[in-house]
Image: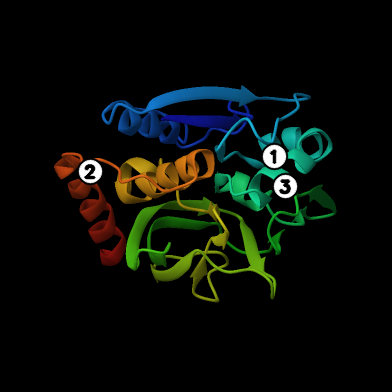
Amino acid sequence: MELRVLALYPEQMNIYADRGNILFLQRRCEWRGIGFAYSAAGPGESVDPGAHDLLYLGGGQDRDQRAVAADMVASKREALAAAVGDGAAMLAVCGGYQLLGHSYQLGDERLPGLGLADLETVREPGPRLIGNVAIEADLGEGPRTIAGFENHGGRTHLGAGATPLGRVLKGHGNNGRDGFEGVRRDNMIGTYLHGPLLPKNAWLADRLIALALERRYGQAPELEPLDDRLELAAQECAREVALRG
């Protein structure tokens, strides 16, 4: 088996070491003898919707989002929509998460979104939403904790057709008011949690790997258990730090 990963705008959308998510996926595949094929698509480059089974879009500051938003809609939107609609797994983090929706409103400026999730993000008056965060999410295997770090000025509001990734246990989440964090649609996940996210939540990395391999090979594989003592300790530490506030 081979995990085929496509990173979108890795040079522009990489903040808070979000690139570490790719490295963590690679290591967990290598430790199990699963092949790992990495590709990247930057400005102006097209995407083959059938060539990759796990799509990744990292975080970026407002200037980075400005640099990629229109290009991504023009050169990649249709292919990304087709891939997600066909069961590809996708992880979008922070700035990347905001671009999954219809738009990101920055004062008088409106950045276009991919429209892959029913959500809008608005830079509202008030302080940035910053800090350690823990949420409870269920990705088909029962409730699990996801822990990470958030730092965003935008407030994301889910539409009636959107399902949140999880319920906030501690932290701000999408907008600091409704108690929800992230979005989930089929095998696509958007979240504000980074720092990076996957090394703190090994079970989530494995879930994404399994979903991606299922798309390629027709069934979800039984992933070989790994010695995750360090990974579990990292998640427990991140969770406790968040819950202590």
Q: Is residue 117 shown left or right of residue 138?
A: right
Check disc 3: other Cα within 10 Å, few if <14, some if 14-19, many if 20+: some
Dot placed on the residue nearer the N-terminal end, 3 or 2: 3
Looking at the image, which is closer to me, 182 or 81? 81
- Disc on res. 37: none
Q: In which quarter of the image is residue 107?
A: bottom right
Instruction: Tell me the mark number nearer the camera, choosing from 3 and 2.
Output: 3
Q: Mark 1 points at which residue?
A: 65
User: Residue 189: image x %, image y %?
Assistant: 54, 53
> Dot 2 lies on which element?
helix
Dot placed on the residue nearer the N-terminal end, 1 or 2: 1
Looking at the image, which is closer to me, 46 or 149? 46
Q: Distance between the residues labelled 3 and 2?
A: 33 Å
User: Residue 53: image x %, image y %?
Assistant: 55, 38
Instruction: Tell me the mark number nearer the camera, choosing from 1 and 3.
Output: 3
Check disc 1: other Cα within 10 Å, few if <14, some if 14-19, many if 20+: many
Please name the amino acid that badge 1 sits on: Gln
Please name the amino acid that badge 2 sits on: Glu
Q: Mark 2 points at which residue?
A: 231
> Dot 3 lies on which element?
helix
Q: Is residue 21 shown left or right of residue 186?
A: left
Q: Mark 3 points at which residue?
A: 81
- In this rendering, the answer to whether 70 lies above or below 162 is above
